[in-house]
């Protein structure tokens, strides 16, 4: 079977022509190494997770980099924080484009090192697990919305050469992630409390995040919860979406919405193990929203674009699930788990467009999307229903005229 093409690979070539280095970040097991090696076959590969390679670098960093006169892929480079400084010297002396590719699973270390030493010299890309569009030719691509939400997108679960039970693999993934990414950063003395925190994040995926409320449930202080959340976000396990600041005369809520970036991981944390259980679960709608959010996010990141995603909610209950900002354009996106396209599902899009026209004529609210559980595209006034399996193409179309 041919390897599954990552859409981000289409961005790497042009970016390498404009920068001496590129950095690919994302969660563990999202496919960064495979992408880098497939997209940059001209570069040798160095695994800095290997203690032997790290020791070689630390013993003689100048000599180590000089042994790759035409550059290399440096995998999991956050394990050698001093690499950026030595790379800066070599890049400035060499002057050629596209010689170095860096990957990292923990964004804070990599971003800090790049900001200190490689600013202006490196192009930044983010790779999340497979989008549904990337799985178009995968033999085990989910054929139902519930199946897609339950399985998520981690590449090992779509490897035709492996026989993996998704729930077991995801359980092992959580254990490995906590051991390798969380414990080195946080002094988690009470593993039970941290596990409860992870489950609560999954239970609140697609909902507003209020640190004090979660802290009360697990008996911790709000600062600890906020710190734990920041680390989960930095490791790409969760993402916060901020409320949009343009209020059109309405008082807005201030709390961000929390999303677990992979819905399969969220289901595992909630002990949901099959599609029937998922469809009858009280959090099914929120988990569908999380999956759709992930698809919109991947549609942007996989084309090398900034997410620029917000949500809009007033204190009197009006809400748009996602707002994609592009200049003076606010592109509204609603998410519905139902397979039946009712006209009422577009009511909030109409409200946002009316308020914008009344209060801020400089803001343009073009036809929006209603992502839903059905299989056919349908009109909804000025807006349109988009089937769950067609999100990538719909977002790409929205990003046409006036996009950043």
Image: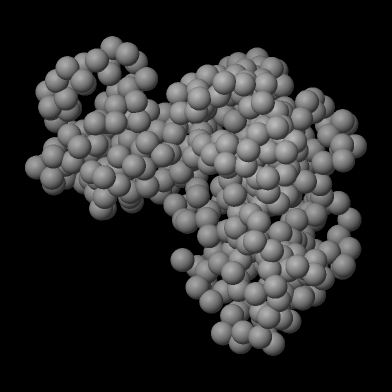
Rendered residue at 35%/30% (across/down):
78
Q: Position of residue 20 (x, y in %)?
A: 23, 45
Q: Position of residue 35 (x, y in %)?
A: 43, 34
Rendered residue at 50%/50% (across/down):
301
Q: Position of residue 325 (x, y in %)?
A: 56, 67
Rendered residue at 51%/37% (across/down):
231
Q: In the rendered view, how is the structure colored?
A: one colour
Position of 125 relative to 55 (above/below):
below
Is residue 332 rendered to the left or right of residue 335?
left
Q: Position of residue 262 (x, y in %)?
A: 64, 37
Rendered residue at 69%/63% (across/down):
253
Q: Quadrant of the N terminus?
A: top right
Q: In this rendered view, identify the residue nearer to me: 232 or 164.
A: 232
Residue 132, visible in the rendered structure: no
Position of 208 relative to 146 (above/below):
below
Q: In this rendered view, identify the residue nearer to me: 210 or 62.
A: 210
């Amino acid at each position: 079977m041919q390897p599954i093409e990552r859409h981000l690979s289409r961005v790497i070539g042009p970016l390498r022509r404009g920068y001496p280095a590129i950095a690919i970040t994302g969660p563990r097991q999202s496919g960064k190494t495979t992408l880098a090696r497939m997209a940059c076959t001209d570069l040798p590969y160095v695994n800095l997770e290997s203690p032997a390679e790290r020791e070689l670098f630390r013993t003689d960093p100048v000599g180590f980099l000089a042994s790759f006169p035409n550059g290399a892929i440096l995998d999991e480079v956050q394990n050698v924080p001093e690499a950026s400084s030595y790379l800066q010297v070599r890049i400035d002396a060499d002057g050629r484009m596209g010689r170095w590719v860096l990957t990292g699973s923990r964004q804070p270390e990599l971003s800090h090192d790049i900001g200190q030493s490689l600013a202006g010299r490196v192009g930044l890309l983010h790779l999340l697990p497979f989008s549904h569009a990337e799985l178009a030719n995968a033999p085990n691509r989910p054929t139902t919305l519930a199946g897609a939400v339950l399985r998520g997108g981690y590449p090992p679960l779509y490897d035709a050469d492996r026989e993996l039970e998704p729930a077991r693999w995801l359980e092992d993934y959580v254990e490995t992630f906590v051991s390798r990414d969380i414990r080195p950063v946080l002094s988690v003395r009470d593993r039970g409390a941290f596990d409860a925190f992870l489950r609560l994040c999954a239970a609140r995926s697609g909902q507003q995040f209020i640190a004090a409320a979660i802290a009360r449930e697990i008996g911790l202080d709000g600062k600890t919860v906020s710190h734990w959340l920041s680390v989960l976000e930095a490791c790409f396990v969760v993402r916060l979406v901020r409320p949009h600041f343009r209020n059109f005369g309405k008082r807005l809520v201030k709390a961000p919405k929390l999303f677990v970036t992979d819905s399969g991981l969220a289901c595992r944390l909630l002990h949901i193990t099959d599609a029937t259980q998922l469809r009858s679960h009280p959090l099914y709608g929120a988990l569908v929203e999380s999956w759709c959010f992930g698809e919109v996010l991947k549609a942007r990141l996989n084309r090398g674009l900034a997410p620029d995603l917000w949500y809009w909610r007033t204190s009197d209950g009006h809400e748009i699930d996602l707002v994609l900002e592009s200049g003076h354009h606010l592109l509204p996106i609603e998410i519905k788990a139902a397979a039946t396209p009712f006209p009422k599902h577009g009511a909030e899009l109409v409200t946002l467009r009316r308020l914008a026209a009344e209060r801020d004529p400089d803001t343009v609210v073009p036809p929006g999307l209603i992502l839903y559980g059905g299989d056919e595209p349908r009109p909804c006034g000025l807006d349109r229903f988009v089937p769950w399996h067609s999100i990538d193409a719909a977002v790409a179309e929205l990003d046409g005229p006036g996009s950043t």
